[in-house]
């Protein structure tokens, strides 16, 4: 399923990102999409990408593999983006590289959740227990 398909847009609604509060479009996604699928609630595209790189739960992200002082500018390196593109491809992700604004990812890297004062890793784990995931950025 393509993220920007007319079918997914038609079944979507206006909402906001649970992490940064930015306007976002909710939708319904494929259960087989990993690591990113459309959902009724969750994160905008930049926050979803941040959550992948920051979440220390190895079932949800790779935060455990990054150094504590990781500089998000490193996300702009071509070999990092090539590997991330491969993750999207093998995971049948509903997020495409074309819709990621890496400058916004870096800008929102340190965003504090508007939904909860919980530490980010706890918030993402709790959200993933519900029907939540990626939302299209407005
Ligand atoms: Zn967001």
Image (spheres, rainbow, N blue to C red):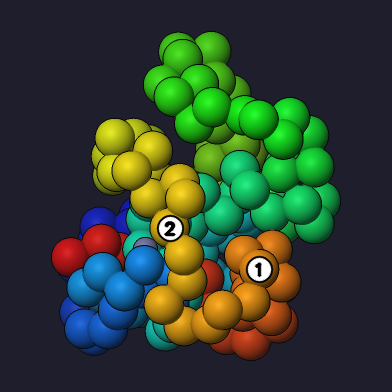
Residue pictured at 50% horizontal, 21% vertical: 74
Residue 116 to residue 59: above or below: below
In the drawing, what numbered circle is on residue 82? none
Q: Quadrant of residue 134?
A: bottom left
Instruction: Give residue 115's position: percent from left, percent from top.
Output: 46, 83
Instruction: Give residue 75's position: percent from left, percent from top.
Output: 48, 26
Residue pictured at 47% horizontal, 71% vertical: 113
Instruction: Give residue 77's position: percent from left, percent from top.
Output: 46, 15
CA neighbours of label 1 inside 10 A, class few (<14), some (14 to 19), many (20+): few
Residue 43 to residue 86: above or below: below
Would you say the beta carbon of the disc 2 residue lies within 8 angstroms of ligand 1? yes
Disc tally is: 2
Is 24 situated left or right of 53 in this image?
left
CA neighbours of label 2 inside 10 A, class few (<14), some (14 to 19), many (20+): some
Residue pictured at 63% horizontal, 48% vertical: 54
If you read the primary sequence from the N terminus, does the residue marked by circle 2 or circle 1 appear first? 2
Residue 24 to residue 61: above or below: below
Residue 100 seen: no
Q: CA distance from mark 2 to mark 1?
A: 11 Å
Instruction: Give residue 129's position: percent from left, percent from top.
Output: 70, 82
In the drawing, what numbered circle is on residue 119? 1
Q: Nearer the viewer, residue 4 or 44?
A: 44
Residue pictured at 64% horizontal, 86% vertical: 130
Is 7 situated left or right of 84 in this image?
left
> Whereabouts is ligand 1, in terms of quadrant?
bottom left
In the drawing, what numbered circle is on residue 111? 2
Q: Quadrant of residue 57?
A: bottom right
Residue 19 to residue 127: above or below: above
Q: If the image is split into quadrants, where does the N terminus sit?
A: bottom left
């Amino acid at each position: 399923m393509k993220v920007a398909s007319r079918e997914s847009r038609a079944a979507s609604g206006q909402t906001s990102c649970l992490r940064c509060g930015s306007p976002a479009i909710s939708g319904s996604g494929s259960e087989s999409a990993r690591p990113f699928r459309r959902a009724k609630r969750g994160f905008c595209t930049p926050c979803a990408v941040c959550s992948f790189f920051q979440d220390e739960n190895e079932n949800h992200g790779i935060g455990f593999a990054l150094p504590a002082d990781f500089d998000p500018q490193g996300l702009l390196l071509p070999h990092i983006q090539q590997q991330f593109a491969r993750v999207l491809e093998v995971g049948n992700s509903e997020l495409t590289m074309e819709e990621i604004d890496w400058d916004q990812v870096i800008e929102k890297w340190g965003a504090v959740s508007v939904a909860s004062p919980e530490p980010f890793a706890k918030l993402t784990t709790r959200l993933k227990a519900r029907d939540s995931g990626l939302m299209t950025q407005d």
